[in-house]
Image (cartoon, rainbow, N blue to C red):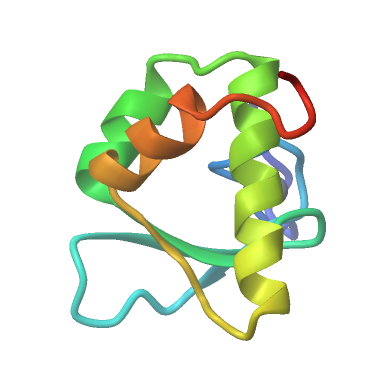
Amino acid sequence: MPVPAEQETDPCAVCTSDGATPANAGNFEGIAQTCPRCGEFKVAGTALAIMGQGLGAEKRAKLSGWVANQNRAGAVPMITSEVLQQIITRPLPGVA
Ligand SMILES: [Zn+2]
């Protein structure tokens, strides 16, 4: 898919919506992004590989919600493969 040269945003690694800004990941094996929907987060290369296989809308929504919660708590979350597995296997809140 061709991308216009003036576009400086990427699809979000979590929710896949356009408009995520790449951030400086620093000395870190992975990517950092700031998404207008999810907020600010880092994704480790191992988690990125899992997410690249296709999570599905429900798991992406859980992940997006988790990132937003961490941001509200003042943290920039790091999504590792371990964190990813915990979040996507967690039952939706309110479902007994
Ligand atoms: Zn997002």
The quadrant holding residue 36 is bottom right
Horizontal arrangement in the rendering, residue 4 relative to residue 83 (left or right): right
Left/right of residue 5 with respect to residue 82 in the rendered view: right
Observer-nearest of 35 and 9? 35
Q: Is residue 83 above or below residue 77?
A: above
Image mark count: 0
Above or below, comparing residue 39 to residue 88 in the picture = below
Residue, x 48% and y 15% (percent of image)?
A: 54
Q: Is residue 41 left or right of residue 40?
A: left
Q: Identify which residue is drawn at 73% across, 76% down.
A: 72
Image position, residue 33 (x, y; %)? 55, 63
Counting from the top left corner in percent of width and height, residue 76 is at: 51, 76
Q: Which residue occupies 54% across, 42% down?
A: 13
Front residue of 24 and 59? 59
* Quadrant into which the N terminus falls: top right
- For residue 20, above or below residue 47: below
